[in-house]
Image: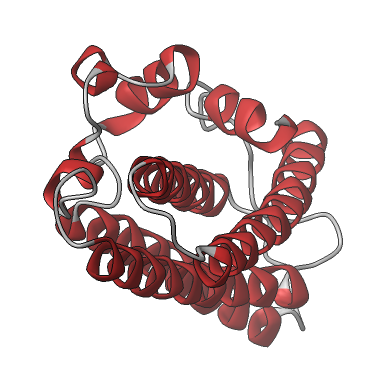
Amino acid sequence: MRSVLVCVSLGVLAGCATVSVVPGETTVETALTKSQSALRKTSDAYCDHLAAKGWAEADKGLAGFADLLIRGRSASEQTLPAYASEIGAASRAPVLVLARISSDSESARKGLEDVTLEARDVLGNARGDASNRNDVIAFERALVRAQMAHRNFQDALEIVSARADMDVSPVETELGDFAASIDEARRIADDLAERYTGSFGAAS
């Protein structure tokens, strides 16, 4: 994923970009700063929410973020995944488990869509060659956490499906909608990353 790789690279870049204030652009710059701040706050809140719900791992900083991308699952996830274990995917009544997966997926999807709206706002308010490194990193973290949550929901669905002969198509549809939201967020993340790397190269 191009945007994720760009994000990791951005984390180790020194802040050598310079910003010049052009008369007449004060209003635009103020609006941009506010939208960038909103994106970071919304992205961080989303990551915290997913971690608190047990849908994705807590943020372990840039080093942990890069390690997660390289290694994928941690060693502790080689047995029953934590989320699947928490909701009783292998033991509770299948109908209850399926309802839980669908509800959690919907909540995670809507949260990601809110974050993506903030990212769109940054793109809409920024100048054509401007983006902010912190915005890129924050949004990338939210995107990775969403992917982790989707994978956990999918794992739980596979576990409960293996022991129950039930129609799981409604849950599959919800997970498909979540996957589509993730794909859209990835496209926006690519745009943010491309805009930042372009402005960074021009200003450094």
Q: Is residue 35 left or right of residue 121?
A: left
Rendered position, 16 above or below 192 = above
To which quarter of the image does residue 158 belong? top left
Q: Is residue 175 left or right of residue 103?
A: right
Image point 76% across, 53% down: which residue? 187
Residue sitting nearer the eye, 179 or 67: 179
Q: Residue at point 66% right, 77% down?
A: 121
Q: Residue at x 34, y 46 (%)?
A: 156
Residue 59, x across and y down, in percent: 26, 40
Q: Is residue 79 above or below residue 182?
A: above
What residue is rendered at 30% in x and 46% in y? Answer: 56
- Which is nearer the eye, 142 or 167? 167
Q: How far across and how far down the image is residue 50, in percent?
A: 28, 57
Give the quarter of the figure containing the C terminus: top right
Q: How many marks?
A: 0
Name the colouring of the figure.
Answer: secondary structure
Q: Position of residue 27 (x, y in %)?
A: 65, 87
Say which of 39 and 153 sits in front: 153
Residue most extreme to the bottom? 27
What is the quadrant of residue 102 in the picture? Answer: bottom left
In the image, 10: left or right of 88?
Answer: right
The N terminus: image quadrant:
top right
Residue 33 vs residue 149, the one in the foreground = 149
Q: Residue furthest right?
A: 128
Residue 94 horizontal/vertical position (percent): 27, 61
In the rendered view, tell whether residue 143 sits above or below residue 104.
above
